[in-house]
Image (cartoon, rainbow, N blue to C red):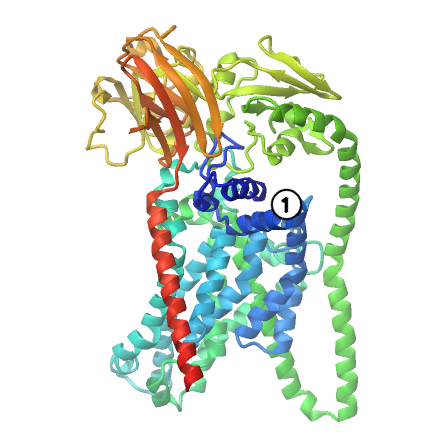
Amino acid sequence: MVDEAVKVGKQVFAGRLSPLYLLDSWQERWAEGFALSSYYSHLPQAVIGLISIGSNLNPYELFVWIRTLLLIFLPIMFFWGATVLGLSGLTSLLVALFSQAIFTNGLYGIDVSSFLWRGWGLSSQLMALFFMPPAFAYAMKYLQEKKALSRAVLFNFILAQSHFGMFSLLLLGYGLYLPYRLSVMILQELSLDYLKGQRSKIKAIAQILNPQKIIYEIIIPWVKFIFLTLFSLSYFIVPFFLQSDFRNYSIWDPIWKFDSWGLKQAIVWFLNGDLFDYGRFPVISIVVILGVLWGIGKIGEKGKETIDKRYEIRDSLITSTSSVQAGFMSFLFGFYFLLFSGKTTLGNLINLIPGMAEYHQHRTIVMVQFIGIYLGAWFVYSLLKKLDTVFFRRVGVFKKGIFISILIIASLFIIYYLEQPLVSYAKDNALWIARSNKAYLYDLPAYKKIKDKLESMAKGRLYVGKPGNWGRQFTVGETPLYMQISQDGFPVINFLPESWSPNSDTEQFFDENNQDFYNLYNVRYSILPDNIKPPEFAKLVEKQGKYNLFQIDTTGWFDSGNINVLVRSKKTNLLNITRLWFGNKLLKEKNYPVIDLRSDQSNKPTHEWIDKLWQIQMVDKNNFINLNDQKERSIWIANPMETSFMNLVKPSQEGMFEFKNEKASPNGYTIELRVKKDCQNCIVILKESFHPNWQIKLNSQSVMTFPVFPFYIGFTLHKQGEYSIEAIYQQNTLKKFLLLLEAIFIFYLVYILLRKVKTRLRS
């Protein structure tokens, strides 16, 4: 992502691309491309890329330095967040200690194994976690004290731009604050009335729940904060949800990523220490458990404390900050812990939460740990404070000094003990890095020559194996070649570091010995090891060491074809029927079924040729309805992709289309085309994943596009003639409009702020 930002930034400074491409660009390194910045937070990577360009520093080295500094200063951010929440200095220090002492067995949490090599490399999550403490703290400060609204919005904006998934989890917590606050007020009033022996609870509740005070002191500030935060992110959020049909929901990701581990497993991990203390005695786990119970107790405790001050409470809805925070955080811990159990426990109920149906629910562990360490540190401080009250004040100064000294020495031993898993991890990590670097330097000269050769050749996709076959063992050093070469900017297939492209899942059926697949995916090059026999149609271009570079003839980024079939389906039901399309004559004959993803099937598309197509509707992944006879069938019994089943009329295309002068531009492709005669069912396809942001111009006139199998961009071309085709990835119009609104709003806020400063200076 950083490297992509560098490439886009250089094109922007050269005047070949709009600066908006830094916020919305096409990523085609994997799975036939996808709108990465529409699906993934991107500003930190763009900033790193721009710093690299401005400073002429190596972007990868700069990224590593920034990641390292984030890790070093992460405890300080936790300390800062705790102080903003109003916690004591000692509590804040404990929060900072716990934040970097947590250790798991690779559960994608906030421990260092999630962020370093040999771990999981979650750098965007690290960036988000770095800003999460002040984001959460300032949000709570504003909601309770009506202070620091601008800082609350700013840090939550930065958090969301670092990792929108982490922000969305925190946003759920903010959403629960309002019902929690109102519920606690009612419970406290009921408790007071019970202790006072009053019977008219409804009347008492009506008195304390003064609508005017609730609206002005709780609801309006909450709405104001939520609105401003979401508005600042609207240019990203709105297209993200509106374009969800073009974001893949992968079956190749392990099911536990989407459904998490279930409540039983979460409880087992929590109680045996694996969520906080893997590989050691569960010190942090114990204090977290006690901290959660302590926080729950603070809610009832507040009711008892204020039994003689009930009228003061009714005059002001702002109760004790510490009580509200402690109780709310215990409530949040329970909520996130239940959410961490995922769909495995909650089933389809979790789909009621916007965005959670396609979210990797196991990542909720971050919030379980984040809230847990605050509660654990808070409890330890309250315990020490009570110990001071009960014990220290009853002993002499000498005995008190001895006890404190013993406590400090014991604390140092505890800290040393807590750090042991991290120390062991670092030692192992260092050994693995040294071994990997040595192997990498051995392979680097040969790999660099192959890379230089590829850079001198026409642009095309590469096949270098995949994780499920020999590709995992075909490496540069100890890094798989498909990973290394995609990092260096070459588009590869069958490697899915991210699976958002709608071609991700079906691409895995690529047949390395079938030339039709190379043409379909525009795989012009293949790098094979010595022990893999190349296909007969591949031509050896370069051999360097263990790397053998082959070239394969394809039609390029564009191709012509026929359309005779329309498939109506949800995006999640296309995998099996696409696989059947791969396996019969339709692929060889370049007959591309049209994909109709519309949720409202009552309105017909505007294309006049739709009614002439053989139409089917997918009921699920394995069953379809023939819309001609309205009968439901299984695709495994009556294959809808068999030409005999469809009784198609297939016009011959041979010699009808002539492509020439194909060129790649920073934001698309151009090509010239000659059509020799009219063709009713003919289309042209661009071998990029379909997305509405792509615009196709035919002789400078925009044409309507539609998705075709496997999930490419198609458009009809019926008439003979000479054509100039231009395919350009453009920013979403709605995104541009929202960005303009946000810019106007920011300038307005700056204007108001300057006026206030000017007024204060005059006074």
> Looking at the picture, how far across and down is residue 323, in whole percent?
48, 77
Quarter-of-image position of residue 562 = top left
Instruction: For residue 107, say whether it is visible.
Output: no
> Looking at the picture, how far across and down is residue 206, in whole percent?
26, 80
Number of numbered tags placed on the structure image: 1
Quarter-of-image position of residue 464 = top right
Left or right: 395 in relation to 701: right
* Image quadrant in which the C terminus is located: bottom left
Q: Residue at x 58, y 23 (%)?
A: 463
Write down the residue under mark 1: 59
Residue furthest front in the image: 15
> Looking at the picture, how far across and down is residue 159, in whole percent?
50, 58
Position above or below: 648 against 382: above
Q: Residue at x 23, y 20 (%)?
A: 609
Callout 1 crowding tier (Cα within 10 Å): few <14, some 14–19, many ≥20: many
* Image quadrant in which the N terminus is located: top right
Identify which residue, 750 or 266, lies in the foreground: 750
Left or right: 389 in relation to 347: right
Quarter-of-image position of residue 749 = bottom left
Kind of residue indicated by mark 1: Pro
Secondary structure at badge 1 equals helix
Left or right: 27 in relation to 268: left
Identify which residue, 494 or 654, lies in the foreground: 654
> Looking at the picture, how far across and down is residue 686, in whole percent?
41, 24
Identify which residue, 336 or 570, lies in the foreground: 570
Identify which residue, 115 or 455, lies in the foreground: 455
Position above or below: 403 against 419: below
Q: Residue at x 59, y 78 (%)?
A: 88
Instruction: For residue 590, say whether it is visible.
Output: yes
